[in-house]
Each structure stands twice: as structure tokens, then as C-alpha cells.
Amino acid sequence: SAVISQKPSRDICQRGTSLTIQCQVDSQVTMMFWYRQQPGQSLTLIATANQGSEATYESGFVIDKFPISRPNLTFSTLTVSNMSPEDSSIYLCSVLGEDPNEQFFGPGTRLTVL
Amino acid sequence: KNQVEQSPQSLIILEGKNCTLQCNYTVSPFSNLRWYKQDTGRGPVSLTIMTFSENTKSNGRYTATLDADTKQSSLHITASQLSDSASYICVVSKASSYKLIFGSGTRLLVRP
């Protein structure tokens, strides 16, 4: 199984600022994803982080708000830009295992926007 | 529309008791169904993965069933422990796609 770490684990931010979340995997992976989990809700896919090219965003999510970097096969960042209280959520990084039926999740970053 | 619905939304049981969580889905074409456990403040952890041909799969005290004809699944927890308190999420994968369709989860609280 893949071991995924995220930084920071939690943060409290002011409205209008930006936060960059880091995701580190202990092995090279092809597919890496970013999810959002709003309070009391299940997970929603934000985008697929593609190595060497622009991320693929899901409906309702745009690059200007959630820019993503994927410089190599073990690392990705998600930035939450110009934050508002509605962005308060848990943000999770996820990767596919060697078996594509397996998907592993990071511990999440709990973001609170005041 | 591809959907995954879970019931109950929340459940409280006494330690040592058994419980069963339900999942209905309308995802097509179907690839596999997974149950994840998510502790508060943590990422989801996979409990079981079942493909079309599998009816039952166990992982310790967790037993998942799948009826692909009726598009229903259940997760049975035996002899519950306090550490079972978590959200349990049913997730369905579409064939030829890496995208997952998540249920809203069942919040389980096990009381001493």
C-alpha cells in the first residue's frame, strides 16, 4: 500500500488569503487526485493531478481557485486561493495503487477560514 | 444518474453488539464496490473491495455482501468495539474509469 503524508495537517486562515497544501507519497504513482470533504459531507473530486501537464478539473472547480502542481511522481500541491469561509473543508490527497482497484487516501488537511 | 445511497445516516449501538449498514447504488457500468472506514479527522481507509462476481468478503470483524442484481451492498460489523466509531463510506467504481462515486456515509457511534 502507498503511504501518503500531507502538510499542513490543519490550518486556520483569514478570508482573502491563500494556502498551499502538500502531498507526499512514499512511492512513484501514476494517478494522484485531490478531494474536498465539506463538513458532514462525503468526498468530492476536485481534480486529477497530472505529472508534467495541467491538472484535469471536475465540474465546478477551476484552476484559478485551485491551482495544482505535480512536479514528479511522488509529490503534488493544491493551493486554495482567495479563501472564503465556504472553503472550510478537509482537503485530501489520494493515489491509485499498483492494483488500479485500490485507492489510498492521505490523512487530510483540515482548513478553517475565518 | 450515477448515485450511491447509504442508510442509516447515523447509528448508535452498544459495545459488543452487531450492526449492519446498507448501500444501494445505480452506477453503471459497474466495476467494483468498496467500503471505507473514516475516523474523525483522518482519511478513509479501505475495508473491502468487491467485484461483480463476489458476493461476500470479510476483513476481520467486517463482512461485506454484494448483490449485483439488486445493486445492493451491506457491511456487517460483528462484536463492535469502541474503536469502530467512525464514518463508513460506500464507494462504487465505474468500469473503464478511475473516478469513484461516494455515498454520504453512515456515522457509527459505539458506546460502552
Image (cartoon, coloured by chain):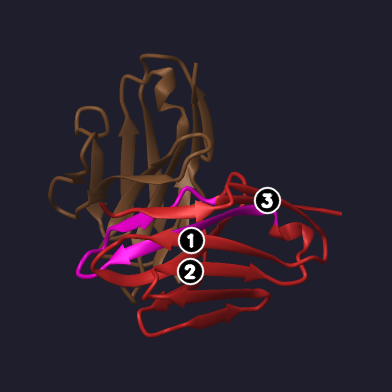
Chain colours: A brown, B red
- For marks 3 and 1, the one nearer the N-term is 3
Q: Is residue A102 visible?
A: no
Residue B20 position, x and y percent, is: 63, 65
The residue lying toward the viewer, choosing from A75 and B99, is: B99
Q: Residue furthest right?
A: B112
Image label count: 3
Q: Indicate yes or no whether the magenta region holds residue B37.
A: no
According to the picture, the residue beneath numbered tag 2 turns out to be B73
Chain under numbered label 1: B
Counting from the top left corner in percent of width and height, residue B37 is at 57, 59
**Residue under mark 3: which chain is it in?**
B
Disc 2 from disc 1: Cα separation: 5 Å
Whether residue A17 is situated above or below residue B41 in the rendered picture: above
The residue lying furthest to the front in this view is B70
Q: Residue at x 12, y 50 (%)?
A: A53
Is residue B43 found left or right of A82 in the rendered image?
A: right
Give above or below for A11 relative to B66.
Answer: above
Q: Mark 1: which amino acid?
A: Cys
Q: Nearer the viewer, residue A51 or B18?
A: B18
Indicate left or right for B91 with B15 as reference. left
Left or right of residue B75: residue A45: left
**Label 1 SS:** strand
Disc assigned to residue B11: 3
Q: Helix or strand or loop: what does disc 2 sit on?
A: strand
Res B23 label: 1
> How far is the residue under mark 3 from the one under mark 2?
17 Å
Q: Read off the magenta span.
A: B85-105
Report the quarter where the N terminus of chain A lies: bottom left
Q: Secondary structure at mark 3?
A: strand
The residue sitting at 24% across, 43% down in the picture is A69
Along the viewing direction, whichever of B69 and A85 lies nearer the viewer = B69
